[in-house]
Image: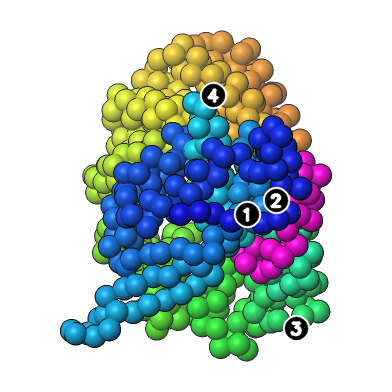
Amino acid sequence: MRIRFHPLVAVVFAGLLLAGRQDVDPALRAAVERFFETQVAEDVEGYLALWSAGAQRPPADMLQYVFEGGDDTFSDITIVRVAPQGDRVRVRVSATRERVMPSRLPGGKPIVRRSKMLIGLTYVRENGEWKLLREGPAFEDLAAALIEAKTAEEREALLTAEPELLTDSLIHAISGQAGQAAQLSQYAAAGQGYELMLEVARRVGNRRLEGEALQNLGNARYFQRDFGGALAAYEQRLALERERADDQAVAAALGGIATIRYSLAEYTPALSAYREALALHERLEDESGAAATLISTGNVLYVQGDYDAAVTDYARSRDLHRKLLDTAGEADALRGLGRVFMARGDYAGALEAFTGVLAEARARGNRAAQGQAALSLGEAHLRLGNLVVARTTFEESREHFEAEKDAANAGRAWQAIALAELMAGRFQEAEHGYRSSGSSCAGAGDQACVASSLVGLAFAQAAQEKFADAIVSYRKAIADFTRLGQSEPAARAEIGLSEAFSGTGDQAGAIEAATRARHTAVALDNDDVLWRALIAEARALRRRGDRGPAVGTAQAALYPLDRLAERAKVRPASPVPRDSAAIFTTLAL
């Protein structure tokens, strides 16, 4: 087999020529010839031997399947272009492939298919030989090269060198490679790919794909917690799609904007955007889109404390998903209903909802979903005081997470188990549970979970009057929360530290810890932390014998309690804490 060369190759890419000859490197030419020869010969081992040790080679069984599907011959094979790129060389080859396949009918004539090909081969020098790094359609090769380019100048050179490849196919190829990175949770790489997709879509002039690139870019930035960047991308898409009058795309952009607003706790504009998207889905008779959006509106309404409206939207979503035979979506709606029932104190309704969620996860064999559902179900049993059932359900959750090697969620399940033990008065078992939680969360690198485990451990230690150990654990938790910038949980741990100091008789240390918590609560405008800090301070003052200051501090705790009561009237999702009766008990003492 001889390969012809495009007459411009030698002129444009002289850097690859042999000294004194206007020709392509013979070794590279031989490698290209061998690429086609091994396919004609259906030589699996020979074809695989062409590849670099660092390349992702096609599986041998897949190659065998392709070879057995028909007999290939190649003609008009022409090296159109050879381009160096760093330590590798990209070769563009055109060819005509003729494939002969056996007839699907007994005694029928063989099926002959002829097609023109423009493929990209990327080679790298390895032990003195040219070895394949990748092969595929030319636009996929160019997409990979663009993504690998280090500078804007390199990308511009690649784009201007092959204007014939600036088509929708190139945009889709870039999108596909960025999507693969997103599926692997490599969101920074995915974002770079979608930025490139956006650039090429604008260059090609395809506004529909430009809009898709903006949506995907917003998604990638969202998962990197770059809410500002994500919002900018979604808003650009919204403006573009309104111009194009594409209501489906407008709804998608509105959904992205609403998600960012929700993440920023801007619930009113989030709800407005979700409802506008919902209206579009309903007008388009897009039941799937409407069902998904109703879960989002239900989530916002739940956070706002509008439980009746949240139940209405979750129930509508459940009915639509059921109509669509989408059991996973129906389970999502049930999960939302379960949260509302829990907040209302309707634990029987919550149990029914979460049982449905768990049943769906079992039917799919999804252990991660089973773990989450069991965790929610166990919490409902815990609220009802069904401690044995709750603990058993939490154990089931932990087993699912451990089977999935999800150490962080396994750690949270251990925390739930430990809480059930605390409520049962089994403080040694609770201590073991919190230690197991901390170990599991540390293995996952989840420092916030580790700090929460330390707080639980300290509480269990204090309950056993191991006050010195509790002080050590609380201090570690406070240090961790402070490093993480989590002021509220740090302040709550300070309140626990105050109680532990008081248990050792160090009332001065107890007052200092409570005072630090009080100052943080005032700075955060957090009334729940404030009244607890004031009561911890009042108790330490009383134990030190400062009756007057103790009474005054306890009375001061009534003011944040009053504010909490007023807030609960308009925000049912934020009820007055049940243990706030401790204020009156402390005053009575």
Task: State the image coordinates of residue 33 (x, y, percent, origin top left).
Answer: 48, 49
Left/right placement of residue 506 relative to residue 104 reads right
Which element type, helix, strand or loop, lies under badge 1? Answer: strand
Task: State the image coordinates of residue 61 (x, y, percent, origin top left).
Answer: 28, 52
Segment colored magenta? 151-174
The residue pinned by badge 1 equals 5
Task: State the image coordinates of residue 460 (x, y, percent, origin top left).
Answer: 39, 26
The residue pinned by badge 3 equals 245
Q: Is residue 169 magenta?
A: yes
Could you tell me which residue is drawn at 31 percent across and 35 percent down? Answer: 421
Foreground disc of the pair 3, 2: 2
Foreground disc of the pair 4, 1: 1
Task: State the image coordinates of residue 433 (x, y, percent, origin top left).
Answer: 33, 30
Q: Name the N-terminal-most of marks 4 and 3.
A: 3
Could you tell me which residue is drawn at 48 percent across and 19 percent down? Answer: 473
Q: Are marks 1 and 2 in contact (CB under 8 Å)?
A: yes
- In the picture shown, does residue 105 fall above or below 139? below
Structural distance between the alpha carbons of marks 1 and 3:
48 Å
Q: Amino acid at mark 3?
A: Ala
Structural distance between the alpha carbons of marks 1 and 2:
7 Å
Q: Name the N-terminal-most of marks 4 and 1.
A: 1
The residue pinned by badge 2 equals 9
